[in-house]
Every structure is written in C-alpha cells, then in structure tokens.
C-alpha cells in the first residue's frame, strides 16, 4: 500500500484544491482497515518532518492542512492536532484553522481559544501609497481578522467542499490515530524562510456591477478562493493556455465573481515585492489568454499594471486604450505617478514597436509625454565636426568596420587618437569615462544603453562598482527617476550576484571532488591508469586560486552594495534637508525603497552606514528591510 499512499501524497501537494477528496478516501480506508490508516498517517508525518528539515515550507503547509482535515474524517484525534498546532503556532496555525476550526471549537474549545503577533516590515511591502479605497494589510493580520469573522459565524464557511459529510455514518464509527510529537527543526542562519507579504486588494463588492457578490475582505471565503486560485497558477505557470483554462474552470465559478478574483490574484502576484513569484511575461501572456477566452467579461481594470507588462498588453491589442480617461495627467508635474506611468509605458512601447507608430497612436494631447525618438548623437557627423580632433579617424574607422576589417587593422587607426585617460586606461575612472561617452552618444535610446551596459559588464570591460558610481553621478541626476536607470542598476546587481554564486558553486564542486579523491586514496582504491578521472580532480593549488577569486568577487559585491547605499543615503539626506528648508512634504512619489540580495552584508551596512546619527526617516527604511528576515 505504501507506493499508492506516496502517490496520493504527491497528488495532494500538486492539487491541494482536491484535498478533501483525498482525506475522504483515507477516512474510508481507515474505517475499513485501521492499520492502513495508521500507515498513511505515519508516512505523512515522516514527509512533513522531511519537508520542514529541507525548507520545503509550501509542501509542509499543505501536509499540515491535510493532517488537519483528517480530523474531520475521524482519522486523527482532535487533541493531537492541537498539540501539533501548539508547536507550529508561529508558522502554520492560522493558515490551517479553516479546515478544522468547527471541529476543534466543538470538542476542544478551551485549548483552542488560547491561540494570537511586529509589523515593522509592512511599509516596505506596500503596493499602494494609501489605504483608500482598499486597505493594505499584513497577510497574517488579514488572516487573523478572517478567522475572527469565521469564529463569530460559529466556524461555518461556504467554500470548502466536504465530501466526507456524505459518509459521516461510516466515518464516525472508525478508530482514530494519535499524531506523534512534531517539533519544527531548530533555526539555522543559512536557512531561507518565506518572506512576509501584504494582501493586495483591487476590488470590493461595490466594484462588481452585477452577478454573484464578491466576498468581503475579511470573509474567510475570500482567503480560501484566492489560495486555491494561487495554487492553480503555481501548478500551471509554465503553460499560459492551460493556466487560463484552469482558472476559468474554477469549481464554484457560478457562485463568485470569478473574473474579478482571478485578475486580483494575478495582479497581487505581479505587484508582490521584492519580485513576483514567476516571470512578468507569464502574467502578461496569461491575461491576454483570459481576454481571448472571455473578451466580453474580463474587467476593464486589466489595463492597470507595471509599465513593462502594460506596454506588452497594448502591443498585443493594437495599442487601443481609453486614453481620454488619463488626459488630466498631461497638465501635471511629470514626476507625479500618473504622468510618469504614461511616459514610462510609452518608453516601453518603443521596445515593442517603433517611434512613429507610437506617435500616430497616442492622442496629440499626450505629445509632451511621448519619449524622444531613439537615435544616436554622433558628434563627428554633426555640423562643424570637421574642425574637431579625431573626425577624420572616426570616419575612417566607420568605413573600415563596414568593410569588415580585422581588430588589428582597427587598432592601427586608433593608436594615434588623443586619449585624456591614457595613464589610467584600466582604472575605474576610465571605465566611468567610457560610460559617460556611451550616455552622450545614446542619451535618447534607453534600450540601447541597457544592452550596452549589460555587454560591458559581461565582457568585464567595466566593473559593477563603476556602473553604480556613474548612475549616482551628478550628470545622471536628471535621469535618476527614469526606469531605465534602475533597470541598469538591477541588472548590475543581478550580474554581480550571479558571478559570486557561480564561483561559490564551482569552488564547492571542486572541494567535493578533491575530498572524494583523498578518501579514495586513503582507502586504497586509487586505480592505476585512471588518467581521465585524475584529470578531472582539481589540485590544492587550483582550489586555493578559486578561493582567492571568490574572495575577490565577494569583496567587489560588498563594495557595490556599500556604494549604492552610501549614495542613497547622500541623496535622501539632501532631499530631506531641502524639503525641511522649503517647508514641504518629504514623502514624494520617488521617496521609496530598494530590496535585493544584501542581507548577508547587514552587519557591515549597519556598522558603517546605517548608524544612529543619520536621519530617522532613512534609518526607518533600513529597519523595515531588516525586519523582513527577523
């Protein structure tokens, strides 16, 4: 029976929306064969402990829910589930109460009532800047309110399908099992735990014009439906068509405003900080499939999203949009959210179309928000360039490249050019000079700059720290709030982190091979003539060189983060002082926060940068970041 049980467990993890079907099956098996039910419970407990030990927290959460529902099927004693909850109270309690709340309330009310948490991190995870019209609640706070609501309704909900009720006569006669003690593994510094999040809301019942009523924000049905939709997305996120079809085939779709809830869940994931669970393109392509399957009923609000996705959405629908609804933003300060959103969306559209198409599509009233035509600014082809030093060589070089010259032939042309940084050719200052020159040539072509910076980093012509110093330099200050600047910054951080990760993986693999070879030699298993294997085993000197390269890369990574945070502190301090001097609100739209792979350097940042003498508002943002992992 064990292989069959293992298959059932895998099905539960992959399709938790069918959980109650499987618990009913196990309940009926247990009623017929007590030992059979005991084997399944033992197997599930073993798998739960292993999932907790290996950090598979989502699988562990579903298995705890499965164990909870087995109480309803008279497989597990209610008191032993409460003992498990007592051990897991900080991890899984609130998430699994809906499955078994009514049963525990009726049988173990006193113990059940003893079970309720700092929210420093919440401002860093908010999507909207205000709580109107929809409040943004920390996910456990919202779930607790939903549970309190469920409790006031005597633990009766209308969403969970409970097939075991049809077999209550058989199940109630079955012998029950007591769970063994389940204790979460000890905390380890290297363990990565799921990040907290804020519940994303776009709709309430007033937004649904007709049809079924949308469950309230604090109704447990809202949580249960959203959780099931999220699991459908997780199961089908690699196939957009299957995902769209599965979402629209939701079991209780006739009882809820399904389209609104699907859109809210998809957008909630897309806006999730610090990053969405899946690729941005998945959400765009899935929403397009949903619009194709139900073109007349998907909410119009599908149009509000990240600029990158929205541009993709527009390009798939001939750039049709209700532009008149946004006409007021034309007269606003271009740094305010609405005009900034329009401009950055049109900037993204240029990557998916061409400038004239965008100009012809957008109403003339939006002319001031249309980006400049992306083109190069080659000074050697401008009027008066003939008197500039190097003009003749520049034209000769272009002609040589067009005729497919060799690198050596190109260098012959370049060797006599004046170089203001000839003595500092390979220094960071020379790298920044190169980046400034690139910006001078491609100032209006943001996509080209993003690509070129990526290539310069990949070929190691410039270092990540040079890119960071250039992006925070005074000449880039007018560009600071433009999205392409942050795209380059994020790309630089990501590339640096990937480089460190690769060096770490290579070093670990080499150490493992070297250790295995040493053990083999010590055990006398070293085979004469096994030359291919010997070639694959690194030497101690090779491992030492790899360690040195890793230390160098980690030092560069730390320096990159220090530069970014130092410049942030300087810019924010200047901003706060300027606002205070002018008597205006410091909390402008761009006064926001950045989060990525910096937690390993928390102690360094705290001791060198985020000290008690800096402005409270800056320190508060850093404390929000720290609270995500506390």
Image (cartoon, helix red, strand yellow):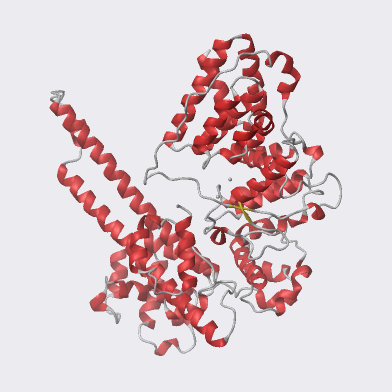
Does residue 460 show up? no
Q: Which of these two is toward me, 333 or 37?
A: 37
Q: In terms of image quadrants, where is residue 256?
A: top right
Q: In terms of image quadrants, where is residue 364?
A: bottom right
Q: In terms of image quadrants, where is residue 17?
A: top right
Please, is residue 410 above or below residue 189 in the view?
Answer: below
Please, is residue 474 above or below residue 251 in the view?
Answer: below
User: Residue at (52%, 41%) from the top-left corner?
Assistant: 91
Count the numbered circles shown: 0
User: Residue at (75%, 61%) from the top-left corner?
Assistant: 320
Seen in the image, is 93 located left or right of residue 440?
right
Q: Residue furthest top?
A: 32
Image spot of residue 312 (x, y percent) = 64, 57
Q: Which of these two is toward me, 19 or 528?
A: 19
Q: Which of these two is toward me, 194 or 218?
A: 218
Image spot of residue 358 (x, y percent) = 67, 68
Q: Residue furthest right?
A: 210
Seen in the image, is 146 located left or right of residue 257?
left
Image spot of residue 255 (x, y percent) = 81, 39
Does residue 361 show up? yes
Image spot of residue 153 (x, y percent) = 75, 39
Seen in the image, is 12 located left or right of residue 389?
right
């Amino acid at each position: 029976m064990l292989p069959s049980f293992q298959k059932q467990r895998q099905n539960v993890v992959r399709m938790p929306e069918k959980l109650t079907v499987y618990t009913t099956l196990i309940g009926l098996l247990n009623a017929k064969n007590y030992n059979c039910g005991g084997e399944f419970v033992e197997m599930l407990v073993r798998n739960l402990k292993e999932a907790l030990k290996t950090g598979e927290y989502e699988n562990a959460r579903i298995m705890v829910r499965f164990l909870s529902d087995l109480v309803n099927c008279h497989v597990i004693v209610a008191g032993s589930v409460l003992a498990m909850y007592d051990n897991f109270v900080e991890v899984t309690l609130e998430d699994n109460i809906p499955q078994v709340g009514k049963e525990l309330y009726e049988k173990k009310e006193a113990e059940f009532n003893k079970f309720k948490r700092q929210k420093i991190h919440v401002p860093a995870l908010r999507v909207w800047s205000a709580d109107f019209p929809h409040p943004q609640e920390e996910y456990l706070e919202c779930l607790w309110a939903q549970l309190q609501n469920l409790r006031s309704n005597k633990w009766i909900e209308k969403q969970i399908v409970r097939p075991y009720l049809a077999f209550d006569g058989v199940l109630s006669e079955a012998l029950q099992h007591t769970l063994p003690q389940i204790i979460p593994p000890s905390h380890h510094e290297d363990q990565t735990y799921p990040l907290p999040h804020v519940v994303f809301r776009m709709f309430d019942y007033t937004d649904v014009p007709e049809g079924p009523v949308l469950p309230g924000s604090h109704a447990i049905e809202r949580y249960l439906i959203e959780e099931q939709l999220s699991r459908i997305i997780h199961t089908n996120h690699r196939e957009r068509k299957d995902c769209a079809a599965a979402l629209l085939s939701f079991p209780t779709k006739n009882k809820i405003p399904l389209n609104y809830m699907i859109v809210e869940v998809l957008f909630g994931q897309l806006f999730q900080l610090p990053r969405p669970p899946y690729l941005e393109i998945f959400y765009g392509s899935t929403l397009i499939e949903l619009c194709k399957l139900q073109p007349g009923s998907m909410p119009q609000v599908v149009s509000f999203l990240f600029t990158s996705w929205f541009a993709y959405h527009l390009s798939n629908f001939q750039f049709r949009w209700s532009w008149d609804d946004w006409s007021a933003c034309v007269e606003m300060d271009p740094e305010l959210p609405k005009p900034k959103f329009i401009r950055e969306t049109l900037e993204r559209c240029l990557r998916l179309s061409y400038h004239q198409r965008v100009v012809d599509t957008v109403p003339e009233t939006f002319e001031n928000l249309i980006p400049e035509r992306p083109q190069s600014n080659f000074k050697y082809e401008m009027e008066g360039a003939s008197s500039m030093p190097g003009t003749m060589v520049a034209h000769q070089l272009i002609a040589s490249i067009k005729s497919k010259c060799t690198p050596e032939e190109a260098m012959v042309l370049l060797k006599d050019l004046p170089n203001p940084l000839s003595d500092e050719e390979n220094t960071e200052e020379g790298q920044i000079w190169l980046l400034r020159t690139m910006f001078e040539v491609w100032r209006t072509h943001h996509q080209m700059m993003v690509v070129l910076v990526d290539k310069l980093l990949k070929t190691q012509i410039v270092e990540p720290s040079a890119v960071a110093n250039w992006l925070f330099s005074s000449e880039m200050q007018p560009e600071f709030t433009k999205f392409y600047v942050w795209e380059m910054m994020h790309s630089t951080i990501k590339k640096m982190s990937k480089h460190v990760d690769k060096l770490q993986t290579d070093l670990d693999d080499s150490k493992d091979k070297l250790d295995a070879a040493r053990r083999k030699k010590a055990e006398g298993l070293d085979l004469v003539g096994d030359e291919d294997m010997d070639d694959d085993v690194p030497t101690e000197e090779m491992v030492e060189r790899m360690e040195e390269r890793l230390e160098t890369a980690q030092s560069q990574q730390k320096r990159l983060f220090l530069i970014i945070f130092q410049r942030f502190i300087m810019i924010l301090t200047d901003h706060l002082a300027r606002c205070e001097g002018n008597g205006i609100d410091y909390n402008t739209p761009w006064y926001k926060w950045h989060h990525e792979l910096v937690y390993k350097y928390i102690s360094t940042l705290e001791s060198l940068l985020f000290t008690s003498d800096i402005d409270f508002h800056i320190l508060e943002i850093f404390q929000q970041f720290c609270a995500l992992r506390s």
